[in-house]
Amino acid sequence: MDIVALIQANILTPVVLFFILGIVAARIKSDLRIPEAISEFLPIYLLAAIGLHGGLEMRKTGFESMLVPLLVAVALSILMTLYHYQILHRLGKFNIFDSYALASTYGAVGAVTFSVGLSFLKSQGIESEGYIAAILATLEPIAFILAIFLTNMAVSKQMRTKKEPFVKNDLDKPVSGEEFGIALEQSKTKLLTVLRESITGKAIIILLGSIFIGYVIGEHGFAPIKIVFEDMFIAGIVIFLIEMGIIAGQRLDDIKKGGAFLIGFALAVPTINGLIGVLIATYLELSVGGAVMYGLLFASASFIAAPAVLRHTIPQAKPSLYITSALGITFPYIIIILLPVMLMVSTALHNMDAINLMGIFDQVLQ
Amino acid sequence: MKLFDVKLLTITCEILAQKNVLDILGKYNVSGYTLYEVEGDGSKGIRGQGFKNDKNVKIEVLLHQDKVEQIAEEIARTLFSDYAIILYVTDVNVLRPEKFS
């Protein structure tokens, strides 16, 4: 299937159509809303379903095969966040705080995007490795830890270069060495609190817990809850994406404020990161679907979990920038265009591998 | 019935600043507060629709004069520049002043 046809077919899926419906509803100022309790419940449900699915798959495949992809993913996620920062700060001329915040938003994984990816593969009838859910769970705190670490660097950098208190309103008072020490101490305590909070946060707990439960119960134990956690998975995403569409639609006007550079960044960076992920996953011998999900880990930007952390760790950054670009630009781009593209690339790479392997096989025979 | 003068400190802020405000209240050993989720419009645009993290909260604290000034000063100093937040102090009367410190 050629890429345009695949994208067209992807648009005509309930997931994407309901997302677009949400955007349209928000644009024409409809009062359509998903009740708050449901839109708070659905991310938990989606993570539980992802976790259970991952745990079940890991029971079949075991842990050994996941170690290398996991370590590579952690390294990639750190490297990518760092290069995002360089691009944003040096080329985009964003200030330190906005650059760090955006860099870690795009370095973090998007659990919603991940769910859409799973449903996309499911609709294509393609399987993916279950342990990618465990990688998702590992990358989630990594992105936060990195965000906190980067903030701390920003804090001490600002203190050292300007010799001014971190808090802008305090400019009338000169800083004494003692206050400087206290401020540094405070930023360290902040680091530990946020670290603990992100690891015990609801996303990690439900995801890791579900992976564990899925692993323990196996197919037999899963059978009675399968109707909710597997058969209704796509329906859950559809309902959640109405809400995401509405929020994205409400924020569309903010996109212009971000400027052309940010729009370019929000489209180019996920594409590059996603394709790097697919390439590496193929090299690490993940399946066609697994490579797409692996690429998606790096392509996606976090728009639910990351802003909550960033608002505390980098309060100086403008949340409208990173939420709008992640949800308003990157998310629709990924679910409509990038997913089919990554699937095409992954399929092509795997076919190439197969051809190469067969070539080698032939040579050996001769 | 005898009424006593105390101050009502009201803070309306984005929900993600809630913890910072409560930490400051805790630092001054405030004996209690009331908190509720609210929506509103202001310099940061309409807030409270969409994600839970976009909501606002309103925190009310009854305090004596001296403490109100310290707390308001610290909130202004540490939070005003980065968060959507407003703060005001009103005079109120209570029956049991010893309850609020």
Image: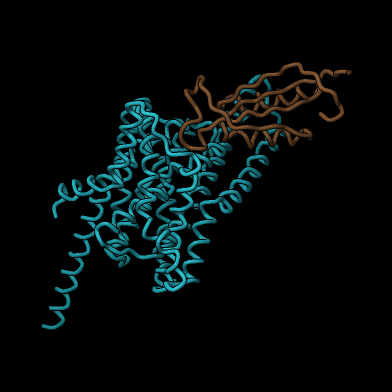
Chain colours: A cyan, B brown
Seen from the viewer's position, the closer of residues B8 and A361 is B8
Q: Where in the figure is residue A26, as x and y percent of width and height?
A: 35, 30
User: Based on the displayed image, in which of its 4 quarters is residue A94 positioned?
Assistant: top left
Task: Judge whether A364 appears above or below B37 on screen.
Answer: below
Q: Is residue A4 left or right of residue A168?
A: left
* Residue drawn at x 69%, y 38% as measured from the top left: A181
Q: Considering depth in this image, is B83 or A171 the residue closer to the camera?
A: B83
Q: Quadrant of the C terminus of chain A?
A: bottom left
Determine whether, in the image, residue A194 is placed left or right of residue A135.
right
Q: Quadrant of the N terminus of chain A?
A: bottom left
Residue at coordinates 49% horizontally, 47% vertically from top-left?
A41
> Where residue A312 sits in the image (x, y, percent)?
57, 38
Q: Is residue A15 above or below residue A355?
A: above
The reply to whether residue B37 is visible in this rendering is: yes
| Residue B28 image-quadrant placement | top right
Comparing B86 with A272, the one in front is B86
Residue A135 visible in image = no
